[in-house]
Amino acid sequence: MDPQLLSYYEAIERASADMLTAARAGNWDEVLKLEGACVLLISRLKHAAQEIGSATATAPEPVPEAAEVAKVKSRIMQRILVNDAEIRHLAEPWLQDLDDSLAGRHKTLH
């Protein structure tokens, strides 16, 4: 894998961790802003991967390096998924409140 692609994965992971920090603080505006940054990074990653893939289609990577990079990529992806799951869990009450507000339902305290 090209180092440029790995740097995109690392940037997405950092943005994901920042999103989680913002979600834990209840800063949903920041979460949404960082989500937009992630979407942009993912788009750039896809574009870069296509460009690199077409440029290096005939030059195979050495197997030991490819295996190590695959492990790093896998660990990054796992951390992103764990962050995403926690963000979703933290967002559930906020999303329910938003849904209730949009539907005109008000919270009642018992």
Image (tube, rainbow, N blue to C red):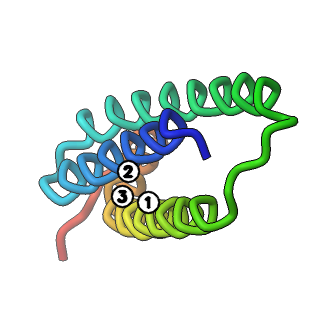
- Provide the residue designation for mark 1: 80
Q: Earlier in the sequence, mark 1 or mark 2?
A: 2
Q: Amino acid at mark 2?
A: Glu
Q: Nearer the viewer, residue 96 or 53?
A: 53
Within 10 Å of disc 1 (Cα), the crowding (few <14, some 14-19, many 20+) is many
How far apart marks 2 and 3 lie (CA) works out to 19 Å
How far apart marks 1 and 2 lie (CA) works out to 6 Å
71 to 13, vertically: above or below: below
Q: Earlier in the sequence, mark 2 or mark 3?
A: 2
- Provide the residue designation for mark 3: 91
64 to 9, vertically: above or below: below
Q: Is residue 106 left or right of residue 37?
A: left
The spot of residue 55 in percent (x, y) is 77, 24
Q: Secondary structure at mark 3?
A: helix
- Provide the residue designation for mark 2: 13
How far apart marks 3 and 1 lie (CA) works out to 16 Å
